[in-house]
Amino acid sequence: MTDPIIEDKIFEKADFPKSVFQPGIYDNCSFLNCNFYEADLSGIRFSECSFIACNLGLARMYKTSLSNTVFKDCKLLGLRFDTCSTFILSFSFDTCILNHSSFCNLKLKKTSFSNSQLQEVDFTGCDLSNSVFDYCNLKGVIFENTILEKADFSNSFNYSIDPELNKIKKAQFTFPGVLGLLHKYDIDVKY
């Protein structure tokens, strides 16, 4: 049996944890003010979809496909993006709360994180080359064995990145945020 294809549909104010979310392929669909809290989105394919002002906190996303998916003004607390399908994985985040989420070992080149909270997010083993962190709170984020080459942290804050454990060649930083590269040395910088 093949999965149904749902195209160009707008879902508004739907409460999916209480109703069953139909498995299938969602192409160019919009989800507006929907509640996916603790919903099981496993195996579902989203292509060219947008999630606006949705709550996806603790949703299960095992082998979920996210291709050119946009998240705006969403709560994405505790999501395991690292369990998603890696085939054509691409998304962007604008004004989202991603605290306690995991992106471990994913290839996320050129990913955009804008005006978002990423507190205690795990990027261990990720390739974030050419990604942009624009006005993001990165308090407690784990960067370990992470490729951050040409990544832009110019406007972000509260990060701590160990240059000895990550690849940061040509990454962009500004003062005072750049001091986050020195945390492990426990030194006082006067300015």
Image: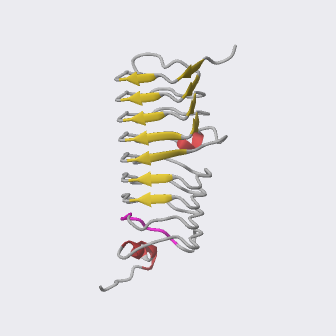
Q: Quadrant of the N terminus?
A: top right
Within the magenta stretch, is there residue 157? yes
**Snapshot quadrant of residue 179:** bottom left
Give the side of residue 18 with respect to residue 67, left or right.
left
Give percent across and percent down for residue 3. Answer: 64, 18
Q: Does the magenta stretch mainly form a helix, a strand or a loop? A: loop
Q: Quadrant of the C terminus?
A: bottom left
Within the magenta stretch, is there residue 115? no
> In the figure, 87 relative to 141: above or below?
above
Could you tell me if residue 141 is visible in this image? Answer: no
Give percent across and percent down for residue 49. Answer: 50, 33
> Bounds of the magenta span?
156-162
**Snapshot quadrant of residue 31:** top left
Q: Residue at x 52, y 28 (%)?
A: 41
> In the figure, 130 relative to 21: above or below?
below
Give percent across and percent down for residue 37. Answer: 39, 30
Judging depth in this view, the residue of 63 and 156 nearest the camera is 156
Residue most toward the front?
A: 8
Judging depth in this view, the residue of 65 and 118 nearest the camera is 65
Give the side of residue 144 with respect to residue 101, left or right.
right
Q: Residue at x 46, y 74 (%)?
A: 181
Give percent across and percent down for residue 103. Answer: 54, 49
Judging depth in this view, the residue of 12 and 187 nearest the camera is 12
Q: Residue at x 59, y 55 (%)?
A: 109
Give the side of residue 51 with respect to residue 146, left or right.
left
**Snapshot quadrant of residue 82:** top right
